[in-house]
Image (cartoon, grey):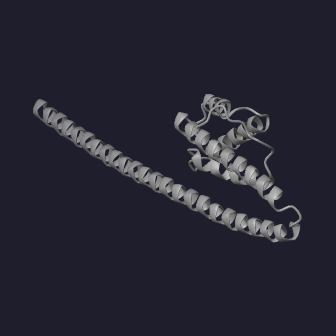
């Protein structure tokens, strides 16, 4: 992670969407509604800092400082690495675009199909990333549902055992009462 790196320019809508997806994958989001809300709050805060020109180090420090369950130090470090890689990619793309523009001035007609192709690739990539995110979320939900089912089954078994123990205790008390009544009746007969 390059803690001193700042965003080189404003992000396009596609870049911001892609970056948001990448950052979301780094968070520890469960199926709890609170986690989803915390993740959204954290990402909004992070994007405000990014757009405000804060360094990656400052962004990571602040989101970890929030102490939300979705982002501890480990997730913060992952986010720092993703931001570094992302910033370097868009910086490299800018430098590459500037070089190509200088070399190909006057070739605007051949550049237009290239932009369209890039948009199509970005759209396909976005769909694939959406599917990956959806699959990951579904897998996590299934795992949590299985864990909740197991807990519910264990609780039901414990409740059943408690009921059986209570019934056994009641039966024993009833038996002891019968024995006490029988003993009292026997003493009463002996006295008479």
Q: Nearer the viewer, residue 23 or 153?
A: 23
Q: Is residue 176 above or below residue 19?
A: above
Quadrant for the C terminus in the image: top left
Quadrant for the N terminus in the image: top right
Farthest residue toward the front?
103
Q: Is residue 16 visible?
A: no
Q: Nearer the viewer, residue 117 or 70?
A: 117
Q: Is residue 181 visible?
A: yes
Image check: 130 left or right of 95?
Answer: left
Q: Position of residue 87 (x, y in %)?
A: 69, 44
Q: Nearer the viewer, residue 28 or 100?
A: 100
Q: Residue at x 71, y 49 (%)?
A: 90
Q: Nearer the viewer, residue 133 or 155?
A: 133
Q: Residue at x 77, y 34 (%)?
A: 53
Q: Position of residue 162 (x, y in %)?
A: 35, 45
Q: Quadrant of residue 100?
A: bottom right
Q: Position of residue 4 (x, y in %)?
A: 66, 31
Count of numbered circles in the view: 0
Q: Is residue 53 above or below residue 114?
A: above
Q: Residue at x 87, y 70 (%)?
A: 109
Image check: 38 left or right of 153?
Answer: right
Q: Quadrant of residue 65?
A: top right
Q: Quadrant of residue 48?
A: top right
């Amino acid at each position: 992670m390059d803690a001193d790196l700042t965003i080189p320019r404003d992000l396009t809508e596609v870049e911001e969407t892609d970056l948001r997806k990448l950052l979301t994958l780094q968070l520890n989001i469960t199926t709890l509604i609170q986690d989803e809300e915390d993740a959204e709050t954290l990402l909004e805060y992070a994007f405000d800092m990014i757009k405000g020109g804060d360094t990656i180090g400052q962004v990571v420090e602040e989101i970890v400082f929030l102490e939300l369950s979705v982002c501890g130090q480990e997730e913060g470090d992952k986010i720092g690495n993703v931001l570094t890689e992302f910033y370097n990619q868009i910086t490299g793309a800018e430098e590459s675009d500037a070089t190509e523009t200088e070399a190909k001035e006057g070739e605007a007609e051949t550049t237009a199909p290239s932009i369209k192709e890039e948009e199509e690739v970005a759209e396909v990539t976005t769909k694939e990333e959406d599917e990956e995110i959806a699959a990951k979320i579904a897998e996590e939900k299934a795992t949590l549902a299985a864990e909740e089912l197991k807990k519910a089954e264990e609780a039901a078994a414990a409740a059943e055992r408690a009921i059986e123990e209570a019934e056994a205790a009641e039966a024993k008390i009833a038996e002891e009462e019968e024995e006490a009544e029988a003993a009292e009746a026997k003493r009463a007969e002996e006295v008479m």
